[in-house]
Image (cartoon, grey):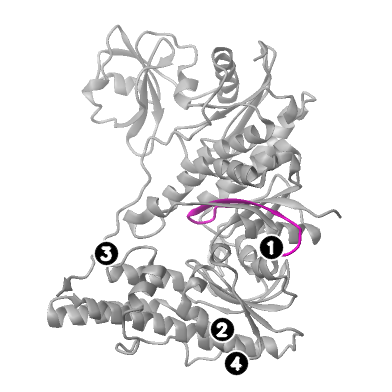
Amino acid sequence: MRSDPTILGFDTSAAHCAAALLQGDAVYGERVVEMARGQGEALMPLLEETLGARGLRLSDLDALAVGIGPGNFTGIRIGVSAARGLGLALGIPAIGVSMFDVMAFRTMGDSVLVSLPAPRNEVYVQPFRRGRPAGEARVIDLDAPPKDLQMSFGMFIVGHRAGELARAFEASSLDAALEDIPRRLCLIAAQRLSEASSFPRPAPLYIRPADAAPSRVAAPKIIG
Amino acid sequence: MKPLTVLGIETSCDDTAAAIVQEAALGDRILSNVVMSQERLHAAFGGVVPEIAARAHAEKLDHAVEAALDEAGLGLPDIDAIAVTAGPGLIGGVLSGVMLAKGLAAGSGRPLVGVNHLAGHALTPRLTDDLAYPYLMLLVSGGHCQFLIVRGPDAFQRLGGTIDDAPGEAFDKTARVLGLSQPGGPAIEREAGQGDPNRFSLPRPLLDREGCDLSFSGLKTAAIREIERLTAAQGGLTEADRADLAASFQSAVTDVLAEKSRRALEAYIAEAPRQPVLAVAGGVAANETIRSALRSVAEAAGARFVAPPLALCTDNGAMIAWAGIELLHAGHLSDMTLAARPRWPLDTGQAPLLGSGKKGAKA
């Protein structure tokens, strides 16, 4: 892989359409367009604009970076499906980047717990050590955070309602919101491109199982 | 225009499907037709769970596309256009399909064409039998039931349709209350083969009313009442009871579809088509009892009966690719703002049969 890859990063995992372009060592055209719906219609034109502003085409790209969540299920699928289609057609890697990675970007602490907003009174969390995921992502109740999340060596909690969460642990904290998503997607993907040559296809990070209840219809009793 | 080779993508329900179809002589058109069924994923829930379906489509569809290309021995550069189901259907799956198709189209520089899923079914007899317009179509599946006069790739006149459940839905629900496996169609058909279709007198909804509209939800309710009556009287159902109920249910659905088809044929033949045809599509058309009743009705009316092979009656990518070919020749193209639509009636000139309000007509 080239040392200065051209990467298009995009995200639709929340109520926005976001994109940015990494070219050489600079990020261009970072845009986050807020929208509650219509991302499926807006995403591709936004990508074309982002490339067009630099006089580039899709065929100039070395890789794609896409946000895989956690977040809005439908939104995550919009981005991931587009990335898979583009990756397949262009023959370039489509690199899935989680919002935990985005939040933890350049947070190099030994013991970091990253917290992201979830529906109701819950948060999504994932532990990181030295900037790398160090455990499974999970969803937890803010009123009863599981004790096994306690990390040693100066635990630091960063993200959504981090201060509140820190009260349940021996930890310092910093309340932070996700920002700079498309730029960070590009930079994280560039880092990964420099470390590996093949990548799994981007897959949604839902954390929550699909909402589905087994059938309650009882079969009739069959008598002999 | 040179003969087209088109990739078709279909994800509107629980089949993840991709196919390559080329314009060629009958029999040489379908280069590949990959269908990855999700049946197993939904089995425990007694029906298709939209979120489970959407999750599976999002992670399988690109594999289905690659398999379809491989089987056809082609690469994306050999494809002239990408056709994708843009609705109606379960929106999560449709959206995944549309976005993957947009990525493929943008990345390969090939045109994109959004296809109505129902048009895919309705145009299948042209893919398989080169039918001439206009022909009468009975579309009968797990999600849909309507009579259409097909006049062109974008010209459909609806003569009637279900006002509640689709027959496939009624088969599934009735199989569930009888304790038979899903999907209910084949399960009931097997069971009915050993039963007496005349033992239980189940209703034939809307037969007393004019026109071609149908109703199936009451039929399922009537079957439940018979089960409750038998259970109260004898503590359960005997194997014979179950087979007889399945047969009686199948017979009622058959009678309703046959009689309404007869009326639809009457309206269609009044137009004096040169070669009258009744064609069927949809999974329910696989039922042998229903199929032979429809054939008799068509023959009695002097119409040819056309039923595509089962693999092309149920959801598949080949029908979408073919509809894409027909739409491209009619000058249709979509751009990158193509929207996925949960609801998209084929015939918008008619008063809605189902659904209204903010979401619009369902059928």
Residue A170 in view: yes
For label 3, the residue is A217
Residue A182: horizontal and vertical position, in percent? Answer: 59, 25
Residue B138: horizontal and vertical position, in percent? Answer: 58, 76
Query: What chain does mark 1 sit on?
Result: B
Query: What chain does mark 4 sit on?
Result: B
Per the rendering, the mark at residue B295 is: 2
Of badges 1 and 3, nearer the viewer stands: 1
Kindly state the secondary structure of the residue where label 1 is placed.
loop
Residue at screen point 63% across, 32% down: A87
Work out how far the residue at label 3 is from the one at label 4, CA to CA, in angstroms: 41 Å
Amino acid at dot 1? Gly
Per the rendering, the mark at residue B27 is: 1
Looking at the rendering, in which quadrant would you find the C terminus of chain A? bottom left
Work out how far the residue at label 1 is from the one at label 2, CA to CA, in angstroms: 23 Å
Residue situated furthest right in the rendering: B1
Choose top left, top right, bottom left or bottom right for residue A93.
Answer: top right
